[in-house]
Image (spheres, rainbow, N blue to C red):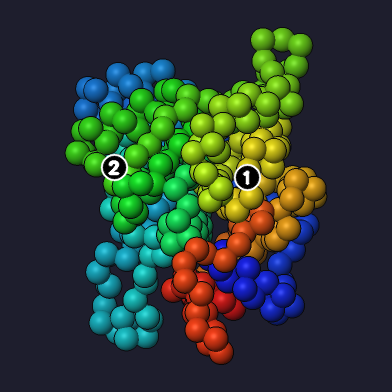
Amino acid sequence: SFVAFRRHGSQLLNRTSFSSRRVEQPQLLITGCARKASSAVSGDSEDKSAEAIAGLGAVQAARAGSPAFWRGLARKMEEAPKKSKKKQQQQAPFRAPCKDPYAECLAEAFLSSAARSAVMSSPGAEARSVSFSARAAFMDRFVMDAVGRRTRQVVLLGSGSDTRPFRLDVPPQLTYTEVDAASVHEVRSAAATTHSLRRRAAFRRLDFDIAQSTEVAPGTSGKSEEEVSEALVEALSPAVKAARGAGVLFLLDEALEAWPEAAQRAAVAAVAKAAPAGSVLVGPAPTFDAIPLLQEAGFQQTNLVNHENLQKIFGLPILEGTSMLVAMKDVEDRPGPKPPTGSRPGPSVAARELRL
C-alpha cells in the first residue's frame, strides 16, 4: 500500500481525487447501539467474559465491538446462499474485502444481543458492513506491506475488537502494541481464551484509554489534550525505541469517529511527535483536518483516500463520506539487494491492487 504511494505518488495525486479537506465519516450507529443496549453483556457469553465486561460501559462496549460486528456481518453476507439461481446469474457473488473468521465471537463478547439486534435492524446495515470490511482490508494491506519492509513494530491506537494479531500471517518477530482501556483489554483477552484464539506475534499491552481521557474538562480530574498527548508519547517510547530505525506502523481505531474530537487530536499529535523516520500512519480519517499537523511533523506524503478511490480498489459500493487517512514519514525503499541495472523494481501485490 505505501509502496504505491511512494513510487507512484504523483500519478495518484494527479489521477485520483485525494482531498485534504475535512471529511464527515458516515454514522456507524455506535451511540445509537449504546443507547438501546440495556447491558453490555451478551446472554450466551461465558462467565469469564461476563466478569471481564462488568466494568465496561455501554458506550465503550459499542465503540470497541461495533467494528467486529460489521466485519462479521460482511463475512456472513459472503457465505449466505443466494435465494435463486436467476439472481445468482444476474448478480456477481459478493466477496467480503476482509474475511475475518473471529469477528463474530469478538462482537458477541463486547455487544449484548439487544445491541446487536439494534444495529442489525438499522437502515443500511449491509452497506455499512461492506464499508467497514473494506476499511479493515485497506489497513490489513498496510500491515503486510510493513512486514515486507521489515517493520517490526505495529501500534494499535484503540485496539478494541481488532483481530489482526490472531488472523494475519506475520513473522513472530513482529510486536503489536495494543493501546486501549484496561476493561477493553480484559474483555478481548477473555474472549480469546474462551474461543482458543492464538496470537501469531508478540504483543505489548498498554492500558491507556485515549478515547475517554479528554472527555473531562481541563481543571478537573481530567487532562487537557496536550497532557494526554504527552503521556501517550511517553507510553509509546518502548515501541519507538524497539523500531531500531525501521519505522513504526500506527493504526488508528476503526471506530475513530466514536472518539471525542479532542481525543482524536491528542492521538494524532502524539503520533506526529513520537513517530521516527520510516513510520506510516493509517486509519479512518479524523473528524478534524489532521494533515497540516502531520505535514509539519515531517509526514511528507499525507492523503485522504475517499470512498470513490476505495470503490475502485475493492470493486464494491462504499458509503459516501468514508475516507481513509494515509501518512508516511521519510519512508525509504525497502531493504534488500538492488535490482539489476535497466530493470524496474516490481511493486508488491498490495501496491498493484492499490494502484488506480
118 left or right, relative to 190: right
Q: Residues within 10 Å of mark 1 (few under 14, many from 20)?
A: many
Q: Nearer the viewer, residue 75 or 199?
A: 199
Farthest residue, direction bottom: 342
Residue 336, x across and y down, in percent = 46, 67
Residue type at mark 1: give it: Pro
Q: Nearer the viewer, residue 282 or 84?
A: 282
Identify the residue under disc 2.
199
Q: Quadrant of residue 309?
A: bottom right
Q: Judge whether 64 appears above or below 149 on screen.
A: above
Q: Nearer the viewer, residue 312 or 113?
A: 312
Kindly report which numbered mark, 1 or 2, lies closer to the viewer in this rendering: 1
The tag earlier along the polypeptide, 1 or 2, is 2
Residue at horizontal 33 percent and vertical 21 percent from the top: 52
210 left or right, relative to 109: right
Identify the residue under disc 1.
276
